Image (cartoon, helix red, strand yellow):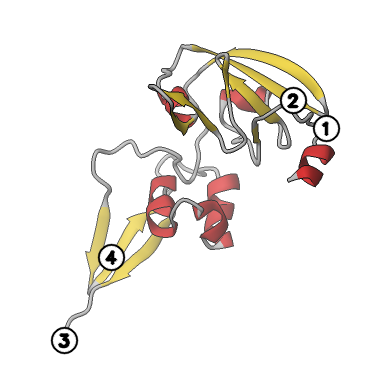
């Protein structure tokens, strides 16, 4: 979109992905801002569609490069902020914030509770992704997204539980 590129002060030869949001609990929150353009990840250029070269002549989403990293690894980003190029390097750290809705599932299998044909599950980002698809952050109900984005535990065992399914049975 030429108008968007102009408003972001991107030259014609530059490509990258727009940062739509930054999770407050990630190490990147200290360095990235909403509106930044990530142009390179560890020296690999990102296309406007968020893909990077893979194997011979193929392309894959840049999340693949991120998935190769572990806690403690260093990460280098080249970004464009307000028209100015920046290089950011940081160490990946484990998030320690007590999020009410987990971003990653720690259990091997999701927990659920069934009573009288009603199936309840703990709300998590993987659950939202499975229920609402790749655009879950636009499609899921606002109240659930609010808990995900801004909810913190008041007690160590606090959880958001949602009605996931109603099992049909004849009475």
- Confirm or deny contact between disc 1 and disc 2 (CB under 8 A): yes
In the image, 85 versus 120, the foreground residue is 85
Residue 62 locus on image (x, y percent): 50, 29
Examine the rendered structure and indicate whether residue 50 appears above or below residue 67: below
Q: Which mark is residue 80?
A: 2
- Confirm or deny contact between disc 3 and disc 4 (CB under 8 A): no
Q: Does label 3 or label 4 sit earlier along the sequence?
A: 4
Disc 4/disc 1 C-alpha distance (Å): 49 Å
Disc 1/disc 2 C-alpha distance (Å): 9 Å
Camera sees residue 123: no
Depth check, mark 3 against mark 2: the one in front is 2
Residue 72 locus on image (x, y percent): 46, 12
Depth check, mark 1 against mark 3: the one in front is 1
Disc 1/disc 3 C-alpha distance (Å): 62 Å
Residue annotated with mark 4 = 119
Residue 110 locus on image (x, y percent): 27, 47
Q: Does label 1 or label 2 sit earlier along the sequence?
A: 1
Secondary structure state at the residue bearing disc 3: loop
Residue annotated with mark 3 = 170
Q: Which mark is residue 72?
A: none
Figure quadrant of the C terminus: bottom left
> Badge 2 local density, few (<14 within 10 Å), some, or many (20+)?
many
Depth check, mark 4 against mark 1: the one in front is 1
> Badge 3 local density, few (<14 within 10 Å), some, or many (20+)?
few
Secondary structure state at the residue bearing disc 2: strand
In the image, 149 versus 87, the foreground residue is 87
Q: Residue at x 52, y 44 (%)?
A: 154
Q: Does label 1 or label 3 sit earlier along the sequence?
A: 1
Residue annotated with mark 1 = 9
Q: Does label 4 or label 1 sit earlier along the sequence?
A: 1
In the image, 78 versus 98, the foreground residue is 78
């Amino acid at each position: 979109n030429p108008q968007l590129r102009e408003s972001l002060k991107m030259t014609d030869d530059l490509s990258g992905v727009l940062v739509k949001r930054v999770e407050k609990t990630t190490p990147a929150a200290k360095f990235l801002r909403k509106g930044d353009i990530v142009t390179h990840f560890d020296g690999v250029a990102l296309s406007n569609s968020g893909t990077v070269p893979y194997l011979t002549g193929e392309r894959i989403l840049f999340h693949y490069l991120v998935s190769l990293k572990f806690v403690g690894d260093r990460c280098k980003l080249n970004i464009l902020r307000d028209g100015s190029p920046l290089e950011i390097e940081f160490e990946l750290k484990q998030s320690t914030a007590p999020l009410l809705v987990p971003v990653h599932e720690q259990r091997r299998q999701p927990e659920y509770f069934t009573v009288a044909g009603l199936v309840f599950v703990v709300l998590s980002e993987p659950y939202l992704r499975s229920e609402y698809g790749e655009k879950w952050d636009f499609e899921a109900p606002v109240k659930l997204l609010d808990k995900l984005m801004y909810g913190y535990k008041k007690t160590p065992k606090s959880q958001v539980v949602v009605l996931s399914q109603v099992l049909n049975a004849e009475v």
